[in-house]
Amino acid sequence: MKVTLLGTGTSQGVPVVGCQCAVCRSDDPRDHRLRTAAFVETGGLNLLLDAGPDLRLQLLRKGVTRVDAVLVTHEHKDHLAGLDDIRPIYFMMKEPIQIYAMPRVLKVIRKDYDYAFRQNPYPGVPSFTLHPVHDEPFSVGGIEITPIHVRHLTLPILGYRIQDMAYITDGSFIAGTEMQKLKGLKLLVINALRIKEHYSHFNLQQALAIIEQLQPEQAVITHISHEMGLYEDVCQGLPPNVRLGHDGLSIEII
Ligand SMILES: [Zn+2]
Ligand SMILES: [Zn+2]
């Protein structure tokens, strides 16, 4: 399995428009962050995790030509606003794009992209097949995927476990029953917005406490704000099995 972080930035991305802080002015490319998304290649399948406003650039950078499923974590625009940019993939594949999400999120997709669901759609619109995700694991092309229920402040959202990796973005609370589903991971990708506490996201200390509890072989932090600090500085203070994610980071799991 290969996991590639397509974007690791919080909702505004980094640099933030108009910001003059040291992170936003950094010339280290690892301090520049598109909105959070990931790409998982396993068992001959290409799985896209979220479709935020930077999706076009992310698909270009990764050279994606096929997407077998889009697993959406929640409906906030930094995770969903780029879904239309998957059209060239649809044109290449000549098959509807398979989208998995909570029923509430599928409703938002139907509303935001209503033109894709009309009886006689305008030529050139994408075609989406929507799959509701509940509590139970589901299979995409023979690969079992376990939904992980997470709270984003008060909003229930999803993380996903795919074989030995799990992807938790935008969480601020994970219940004990869901933590059980995250045991024995080789790779955990988990969000931490900044050093200081935040009302709707884990901060670095909270993410590290979850990593400590779950003991994955390795963990990567994502959904990072410019308030986290410079990549080089933050990495120095992390445990040996934890690193700060950066755009384009690719991890092979055997
Ligand atoms: Zn987000
Ligand atoms: Zn800044």
Image (cartoon, rainbow, N blue to C red):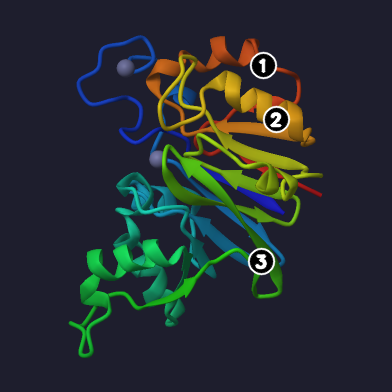
Q: Which mark is residue 137?
A: 3
Nearer to us of marks 3 and 1 is: 3
Disc 3 crowd, CA 10 A, few/some/many (<14, 14-19, 20+) = some
> Percent from the top left, x then y, of residue 146?
66, 60
The local secondary structure at tag 1 comes to loop
- Which residue is nearer to you in this view: 180 or 130? 180
Q: Residues within 10 Å of mark 2 (few under 14, many from 20)?
A: many
Say if mark 3 contacts mark 1, CB within 8 Å. no
The label number, if any, that marks residue 238 in the structure image: 1
Q: What is the three-letter code of the residue carrying label 3? A: Pro
Amino acid type at image mark 1:
Leu
CA distance separating discs 3 and 1:
32 Å
What's the residue type where badge 2 is placed? Ile
Q: How far is mark 3 from mark 2, CA to CA?
A: 23 Å
In front: 200, or 232?
200
Would residue 147 appear left or right of 95 to someone viewing this image? right
Q: Sort mark 1 into few (<14), some (14-19) or many (20+) by Cα contacts within 10 Å.
A: few
Would you identify the image quadrant in which residue 45 lies?
bottom right
Question: Residue 5 location in percent, x, y?
Answer: 54, 42
How far apart marks 2 and 1 lie (CA) works out to 11 Å
Front-most of 38 and 94? Answer: 38
Residue placed under numbered mark 2 in the picture: 211
Q: Quadrant of residue 154?
A: top left
For marks 2 and 1 on the same chain, the one whose residue lies earlier in the sequence: 2
Q: Earlier in the sequence, mark 3 or mark 1?
A: 3
The residue positioned 51% from the left and 23% from the top of the image is: 203
Quadrant location of the N terminus in the rendered image: bottom right
